[in-house]
Image: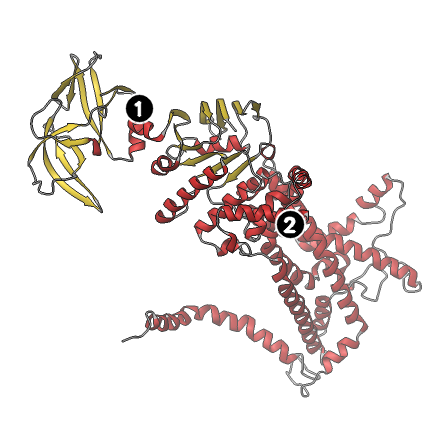
Amino acid sequence: MLRPKGTARRNRYDNSAYFYLLPALLLLAVFIVYPIMNTLITSFKGEYRFLTGDFEGYSWQNYVEIIKDPIFRRAILNTLFIAFVCIPASMAIALFLSLILNSIQKWQGFFMTLFYLPQVTNVIAAGIVFAFMFNTNFGVINMILGWFGIDPVAWISGQGIASSPKLYHQAYARSLFIVFVYTVWQGISLKIILFLSGLQNINKQYYQAAKVDGTSTWRMIRKITLPLLSPTTLYVFITSVITAFKAYAQVVALFGNQYGPAGDDSKMMITIVGYMMDSMGDYLSPGSISKASSAAMILVVMVMIVTAVQIKISKKWVHYN
Amino acid sequence: MQVRLEQLTKAFESRKKDSVIAVNKLDLTIESGKLIGLLGPSGCGKSTTLFMVAGIHDVTDGKIYFDDRDVTELSADKRGIGLVFQNYALYPHLSVWDNIAFPLLNSKDMKKRLKKQFAEQHSNSPNYKAYINKLVEDAAKLVEITAYLDRKPGELSGGQQQRVAIARAIVKSPSILLMDEPLSNLDARLRIQTRDEIKRIQQQTGITTIMVTHDQEEALAISDEVIVLKDGLLQQQGAPQDVYDNPANQFVAEFISRSQINMVHGKIATNKLYLGQEEWFPLPAPLMDQEVTIGLRYENIKHAMENIERSFTASVTAKARIGGISTVQVRLADGQQITLLNDHDESLRESERLNLVVKPQSILVFNQKGEKILQC
């Protein structure tokens, strides 16, 4: 009997493990795996009718159609804008605030509560408040600008944009700006919590050692804090990418179901998820559910590409202990 | 460099009413070039004292002098000290080389000093970079870790990490080296090896070194001088053997002996010392009648052939053998147990009566407050 020690035990362990995992695996299969597979299959169905289930063969037709659709292209562009501006901005702000929070003792709990408030606020309600803050006549933003002698800005206005490309671009830029501000504000709370817990996990003795060696605060942050925080940073980044690519609620909260300021009929601020929602809302027309599915698959692929690239690059800058 | 503490006090603010006094009016002088063991049980304030000398903890009251310079208000980096942490605090994301070079590359003052040094003695190194590399390699050579310069701390054993930590502390040639429990994270064999290393490195560099430890054996083995603390108060300072032979009080006697000492209840009555209830011998000098505790180290109690002066009798109750050391437990007439080394007689039988004597100058008599009132 020269069987390596533990072989028999390991087999027994494996079998019982599956048994214990069964409830979780079942839930996963029903609510995650099946819907994903179904979405994938649906996205290839031609002329798919949701109510009857009829369809005409499988093809790339749905993908070709939505990629040709200017509104979908706009949705991709807007989503990428939100991701590429709001992720770095909110991460930088959250990191900066966490570093400050971590270095103060007094009022830390108070400020943590304050920064966490966006997380417990309803997205739609907060969006309506934001929209009001940017109101041309009564908004607090224009009031503050007024103190500096700046004339009121029509932040959310689609007046005359249909006839003037210049006005259209101006309205688009302003709308984007508001979405950025709102998204960053909404996103920093969770990032601060994550960064702060990461910072508090760094052994204080590293700083004491660096202090004895006369290292300046800025150098300590650069040489010790940031490298040791990098696993947290990667985690925050990946979850931020996923959240940003799913941008939808903030646009609806700020602009309503038209995805644009009053007077705009081009769905100026639509996002990928917004496009999916619109297609699904139109479920009676043949093919619309399939188009929503194709849009969903494109979104998944985009998130996967960005995440894969990031994980690849991260090997260079993330230090695991 | 000489280190002098004057009435050094540290109080930690506590959430409850009273603040905790960790170090209490400590007066100490540590001579230049010595290796000092700062010794005491946990919570005695030894690490706090070290961190105050390092400049990491603020001083509540009192002064710290390096030679004649008052450094009490000076920040840690301006004191010219090297510090080795209990858990090494090596930067896990940096290689061994980068860890050792860290103090040289990240301080403006240090850079200025090194550039000046380089300008003055550029004979050996072709450029500044090579000069830095030479300093790092010299430190690595001293602690014998040159083979691991490219590795990360996580890839090293505990003992190797400890060496890197020492190299990082000495690379900037500090005038004082401070070590906080440097051996406590090592296993027993490595601990002995590393403590001898520390002794060698200290002697080679001649840096005034303060090593905090709770392990009396460690302190006795390598220190030029030990300082015993308890509850933030200085108990005794002196050469290891002197502190061992002539403990200042009951606490030091027990702590230094690491439980290899019997604390026997006795009394003084009409200038005679009583061991338990039995009269033992007349005092060399008169003392007040009182209850006392008599400290008798295991190794100082010997068999006596016959009933000679200052001998006492006891009966064997048990024998024990741990490795090469065998001990005997004996019972006094009043039932108190005493343990002694059984160095020669293997044939002792239970309840056999023994005549025992204690080596001269090793009977330690303490009063009820634990103060030593007699040693004879």
**Mark 1 belongs to which subunit?**
B
Asked if residue A196 can be seen in this view, the reply is: no
Query: Quarter of the image holding residue A295?
Result: bottom right
Compared with A251, B130 (above or below) is above
- The one nearer the camera, B190 or A320, is B190
Along the viewing direction, whichever of A39 and B374 lies nearer the viewer: B374
| Protein chain holding label 2 | B
Looking at the rendering, in which quadrant would you find the N terminus of chain A? bottom left
Q: Secondary structure at mark 1?
A: loop
Dot 1 corresponds to which residue?
A: B249
Residue A45 shown left or right of residue B215 in the figure:
right
Q: How is the image coloured?
A: secondary structure
Residue B233 position in % (x across, y down): 40, 24
User: Could you say which quadrant of the image residue A261 lies in?
Assistant: bottom right
Disc marking residue B130: 2
Q: Position of residue B360 (x, y in %)?
A: 20, 24
Q: Residues within 10 Å of mark 2 (few under 14, many from 20)?
A: few
Note whether residue A17 is visible: yes
Q: Residues within 10 Å of mark 1 (few under 14, many from 20)?
A: some
At label 2, which amino acid type do we have? Ala
- Residue A128 in percent (x, y) is at 74, 52
Query: Label 1 is placed on what type of residue?
Result: Asn
Secondary structure under the numbered disc 2 in the rendered image: helix
| Residue drawn where x is 68% and y is 88% of the image | A56
Q: Is residue A174 left or right of residue B321?
A: right
Q: Nearer the viewer, mark 1 or mark 2?
A: 2
Say which residue appears at 79% left-offset and 68% top-offset: A74
